[in-house]
Amino acid sequence: MCGIFAIFSSSLSEADLRKELIECSSRVRHRGPDWSGYVVINPSESENRPLAHGIAHERLAIMDPESGEQPLVSRDGSIIVAANGEIYNYKELYEELKKEQPYTPKTGSDCEVILPLYARYGATVDLCKGLRGMFSFILYDKNKDLFLAARDHIGITPLYIGWGNDGSVYIGSEMKTLVGECTKYQLFPPGHIYMSKGKHAGEFVRWYTPTWAPELKPGLTPPKGKYNADVLRHAFEQAVTRRMMSDVPWGVLLSGGLDSSLVASICARHISRRSSAFPTLHSFTVGLEGSPDLIAAKRVAEFLGTKHHAYTYSLEEGADAIRDVIGKIETYDVTTIRASTPMYLMARKIKAMGIKMVISGEGADEVFGGYLYFHKAPNAQEFYDETVDKISRLHMFDCLRCNKAMSAWGVEPRVPFLDADFLDVAMELSPEEKMIHKGPGVSKEDTKIEKWAIRKAFDTPEDPYLPDDILWRQKEQFSDGVGYGWVDSLRDIAEKEVSDQQFASAKNRFPHNTPTTKEGYRYRQIFEELFPGEAAEKTVPGGKSIACSTERAMNWDASFADRADPSGRAAGVHDSAYDTTFVADTVVGDEPPTKKAKA
């Protein structure tokens, strides 16, 4: 994972532009500590270029560490690219390009394939349609004095865009590159491309249009695809193995839950088939002493034979890191901060071991309806709409958490559940095939727990991928699985730090996305100190939620109104669910509560 940054159409002098470029780009050097590259393009009347441009790249060397420096420049020097992420099918793309115009790469960087693709497709949506991976990139064409930027289909990699007082355009991997420099800035929408010239100049144009939801919006007729365990299993195995390409040491994140355990299992099986001499797979987990994840992850690691590293942290260590975490992940969303903190602490340990890349299990809950509140989905249409909505918002939640918490220490996370080809298989399934059926009156044979579809696909007793107790383990949200005491301690800290008087005036202090809990108020204060202004606060979504739901799902069950808390225990179906007397800090209503009610 790298950091990219650019300033286009700037009125600054060459010296000032280079100084600004380096200063802003250095704010994301944690993403790419291995090398920095800068290119400044000066104005030129003869080349019809009235304003200056600057492009920067902070590199984390994963592929071709010796010669893959960026920005990448075409042989004639006219096209310049700075890219963040990985393009897993770059070799296949080179083969396709040979049919019309062979291209000999100058480096081993997977991102170099963008140069010949631009030569073929130009500044159009077709430039991105064939890419399979996670990416955000900036491209400048000297001959046309044209720049463009694009972001991957789901927003696995972060990207922001802003506008300066002189009409300049700033684009950066993280919001901190724009704060203090731009009068207006925003999230760069996933699955879109932005071009400075042409029919859609200055607009975000969608390039990712999957058949199951062309605009990633709910309300369409749900797909009717039939369940086929072999097809689903093969598609996911392909998504995982595609992400195993690396020229540096790598490992897997292993919480002991279904998603990360399946990823680890596929990696371990694939490695064992390559060669008995292939390096042992490293797996990593984090949690409070005795937490559910530590116990389950150890069980999986022993079954798979990985070299396992279990890290523990104390409540004090987690609490001490909160401010740094908010600064790195750039959000005030409560769930995201809760889950990012242990991941942030673990990433530091992973990097200290010399590991630069890990494969993780994010995205499965959104695709298969794995969150516990999905037990209450009233029908297939609601279930399908919620999964589409959740996928469309991943770039503001789990993708943001995973990418920024790991990249804070120069570790690249890869997420096979969000592979574009796998999504086409999994999201074309009828939601009836994913819905949860359990409880009184449902036979054992007809019982389906959360994520039944993917569990069943890997339920192969003759050649097991995982132990049964892991394959069918109940869903744990990451902030819960690291230890239930973690969430409770954060609430207690907020109760001490935020007075009733402060909280009572929350709507006056924060009229946009008013915090509805003292914990949320505390995080909002820290966020505002680090990222002041209206533009920053509007990059974070709001709304009521239970166990990570959208607001739509709050209507699925009458009890949700009093249990609107991000923890999976709030949904009322968890084995360790809050009891019936529990009333959340966030009670659905117009005003935030003035008193905290505990279970």
Image (tube, rainbow, N blue to C red):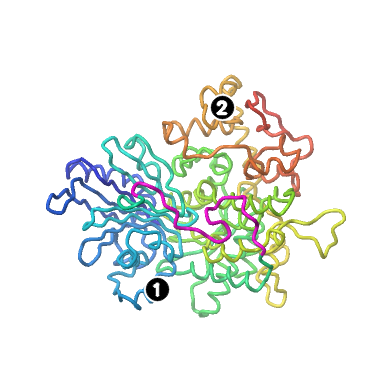
The prevailing secondary structure element of the residues shown in magenta is: loop
Q: Is residue 348 visible?
A: no
Tell me which amino acid carries mark 2: Glu
Q: Which mark is residue 497?
A: 2
Where residue 235 appears, x then y in whole percent?
58, 70
Where residue 125 appears, x then y in whole percent?
40, 59
For disc 1, the marked residue is 91
Distance from Cα at disc 2 to Cα at disc 1: 54 Å
For the residue labelled by badge 1, is the local secondary structure a helix, a strand or a loop? helix
The N terminus - image quarter: bottom left
Corner quadrant of residue 528: top left
Q: Tell whether 89 sits left or right of 215.
A: left
Determine the residue positioned at 37% across, 67% down.
110
Q: Is 4 rendered above or below residue 279?
A: above
Q: Which residues are magenta?
A: 201-224
Corner quadrant of residue 553: top right
